[in-house]
C-alpha cells in the first residue's frame, strides 16, 4: 500500500512541478518523511530469539526484529523507498533543468536517504553472505512450524 502511495505522490509531484515547483517539492517530501519516520518506528521493535535456533539465526533476529515481526510491512516500505530514490533522481534532474535549486537539493538528499531506508527496512533483500541466508531460511522455517 505504501508502495502505491509513493508512486502516485511521486507522479503527482512531477506533474505539479511544471505548475508550482514549491508545491511539487512538498508533495514529494511527504512520502520521504513518512518512510524515515516509519523506519524509526520499526527500529524500536525488539525481538527475542527463540531457543533452538543457531547462533547466527539468533543474531539475525536481534539485528532485524522488525523484519521477522512485520515482513510484509518491511518489504512494502523497502519497495517504496527504492521507488522514491528513483524519483528523487528524477526530481533532482528536473530541478537542475528548470533552475529550481531546492528541488535539486531535495532530490540529491532524498535519493541516498531512501536507499539507506530501503537497506535498513528490508535488510533481508541485501543479505550477501551464504551463512546469513541459511540463517534466514532457518528462522523462516522455524516461524512456519509454529
Image (tube, rainbow, N blue to C red):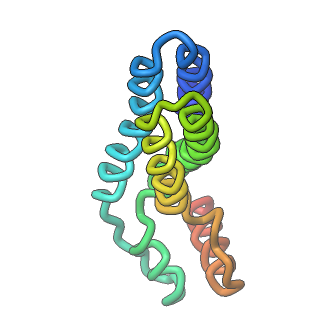
Identify the residue at the far top of this view.
19
Q: Residue at x 41, y 33 (%)?
A: 29
Camera-side residue of 95 and 131: 95
- Figure quadrant of residue 76: top right
Left or right: where does residue 53 sit relative to residue 43? right
Give residue 102's position: percent from left, percent from top. Answer: 41, 36
Q: Position of residue 15 (x, y in %)?
A: 60, 15
Against 146, residue 3 (above or below) is: above
User: Could you tell me if residue 100 is visible in this image?
Assistant: yes
Quarter-of-image position of residue 115:
bottom right
* Residue name at image x 37 percent, y 47 percent: 36
In the picture, measured across the screen, residue 46 lies left or right of residue 85, that is left
Residue that extends furthest to the bottom in the rendered view of this protein = 55
- For image coordinates 67% across by 84% down, the residue present is 129
Residue 77 is situated, as x and y percent measured from the top left of the image, at 52, 44
Q: Is residue 72 visible?
A: no
The C terminus appears in which quarter of the rendering?
A: bottom right
Across and down, in percent, residue 46 comes to 31, 64
Q: Residue 49 is drawn in which quadrant?
A: bottom left
- Residue drawn where x is 54% and y is 45% of the image: 81
| Nearer-the-camera pick, 42 or 28 | 28
| Total numbered labels | 0
Most distant residue in the front direction: 99
In this rendering, the answer to whether 31 lies above or below 144 is above
Establish if 53 lies above or below 3: below
Q: Is residue 128 above or below residue 6?
A: below
Q: Quadrant of the N terminus?
A: top right
Amino acid at each position: 500500500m505504501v508502495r502505491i502511495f509513493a508512486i502516485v505522490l511521486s507522479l503527482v509531484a512531477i506533474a505539479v512541478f511544471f505548475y508550482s515547483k514549491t508545491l511539487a517539492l512538498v508533495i514529494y517530501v511527504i512520502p520521504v518523511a513518512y518512510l524515515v519516520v516509519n523506519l524509526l518506528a520499526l527500529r524500536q521493535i525488539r525481538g527475542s530469539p527463540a531457543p533452538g535456533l543457531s547462533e547466527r539465526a539468533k543474531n539475525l533476529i536481534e539485528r532485524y526484529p522488525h523484519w521477522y515481526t512485520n515482513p510484509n510491512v518491511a518489504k512494502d516500505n523497502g519497495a517504496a523507498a527504492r521507488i522514491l530514490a528513483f524519483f528523487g533522481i528524477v526530481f533532482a534532474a528536473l530541478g537542475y533543468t528548470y533552475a529550481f535549486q531546492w528541488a535539486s537539493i531535495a532530490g540529491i538528499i532524498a535519493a541516498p536517504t531512501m536507499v539507506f531506508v530501503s537497506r535498513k527496512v528490508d535488510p533481508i533483500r541485501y543479505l550477501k553472505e551464504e551463512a546469513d541466508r541459511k540463517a534466514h531460511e532457518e528462522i523462516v522455517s522455524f516461524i512456519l512450524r509454529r
